[in-house]
């Protein structure tokens, strides 16, 4: 019998507890929910867990926070452990359902500090959320951070809307860009801040 890995582990970093200590169970304002996401994203890269990205899942009507996620690619060693994937997975564990739009569940939305990359685009679409709230959607993230977000089509938001997922954009956009610029400054000044991307070509 071949010797193969049978599981992998992805978890939130311990410092999340400190950041959530003063956060109420429900955060009714979308702007306040995005402020929390920006705060988590900024601390995340400084702690060395992964890129400057964070997300949360909330009940749309009440603002109750169901889960939060940060990018833990570096700390977990798992390339798919992006903030959106972590937040969505933890929300599904919390609700006991792989479908966050399933019968008997309130309508949920994903709040993230920029338009999802190609991986998280699919993860969001199939998660069951009924809303996606982003801080921005232009080329600035890639231009500032040098992350490769993948070939997302220009009709990405329309495709969500067609599937019953409302897209709300430009929520605290400038604050998101400030986090990215701080990250880029650290990348330029230190070899210890890692930008991970897909292969640039074939071998």
Image (spheres, rainbow, N blue to C red):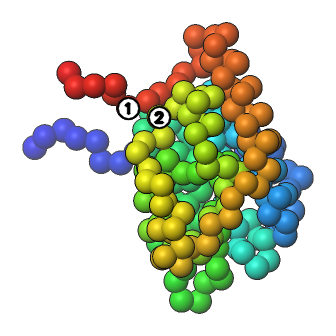
Q: Quadrant of residue 66?
A: bottom right
- The residue closer to the viewer here, 100 or 3, is 100
The residue lying at 67 percent from left, 49 percent from top is: 136
Secondary element under disc 1, as helix, strand or loop, is: loop
Image quadrant where one finds the N terminus: top left
Q: Residues within 10 Å of mark 2 (few under 14, many from 20)?
A: some
The residue lying at 74 percent from left, 41 percent from top is: 176
- The residue closer to the viewer here, 107 or 10, is 107
Q: Residues within 10 Å of mark 1 (few under 14, many from 20)?
A: few
Q: Which mark is residue 52?
A: none
The residue lying at 89 percent from left, 52 percent from top is: 22
Q: Is residue 79 left or right of residue 142?
A: left
Image quadrant where one finds the C terminus: top left
Image height of 23 relative to 103, above or below? above
- The residue closer to the viewer here, 75 or 137, is 137
Expressed as whole percent of the image width and height from the top left, the position of residue 27 reads 84, 65
Expressed as whole percent of the image width and height from the top left, the position of residue 6 reads 30, 48
CB contact under 8 Å: marks 2 and 1: yes
Q: Is residue 170 left or right of residue 102?
A: right
Expressed as whole percent of the image width and height from the top left, the position of residue 84 reads 56, 53
The residue lying at 61 percent from left, 45 percent from top is: 138
Q: Is residue 137 left or right of residue 40?
A: left
Q: Earlier in the sequence, mark 2 or mark 1?
A: 2
Question: In whole angstroms, how far apart are the C-alphas of marks 2 and 1?
Answer: 7 Å
The tally of labels here is 2
Q: Quadrant of residue 100?
A: bottom right
Q: Which mark is residue 198?
A: 1
Secondary element under disc 2, as helix, strand or loop, is: loop
Res. 81 visible in picture: no
Image height of 90 relative to 142, above or below? below
Q: Which residue is mark 2?
A: 148
């Amino acid at each position: 019998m071949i010797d193969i890995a049978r599981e992998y582990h992805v978890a939130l970093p311990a410092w999340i507890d400190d950041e959530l200590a003063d956060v109420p169970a429900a955060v009714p304002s979308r702007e306040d929910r995005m402020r929390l996401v920006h705060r988590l994203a900024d601390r995340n890269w400084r702690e060395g867990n992964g890129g400057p990205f964070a997300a949360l899942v909330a009940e749309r009507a009440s603002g109750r926070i169901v889960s939060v996620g940060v990018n833990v690619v570096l700390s977990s060693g798992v390339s798919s452990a992006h903030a959106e994937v972590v937040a969505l997975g933890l929300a599904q564990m919390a609700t006991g359902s792989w479908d966050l739009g399933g019968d008997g569940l309130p309508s949920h939305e994903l709040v993230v500090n920029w338009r999802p990359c190609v991986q998280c685009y699919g993860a969001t679409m199939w998660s069951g959320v009924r809303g996606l709230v982003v801080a921005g959607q232009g080329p600035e993230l890639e231009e500032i951070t040098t992350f490769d977000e993948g070939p997302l089509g220009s009709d990405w938001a329309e495709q969500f809307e067609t599937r019953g997922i409302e897209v709300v954009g430009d929520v605290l956009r400038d604050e998101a860009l400030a986090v990215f610029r701080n990250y880029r400054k650290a990348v330029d000044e230190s070899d210890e801040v890692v930008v991970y991307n897909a292969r640039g070509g074939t071998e």
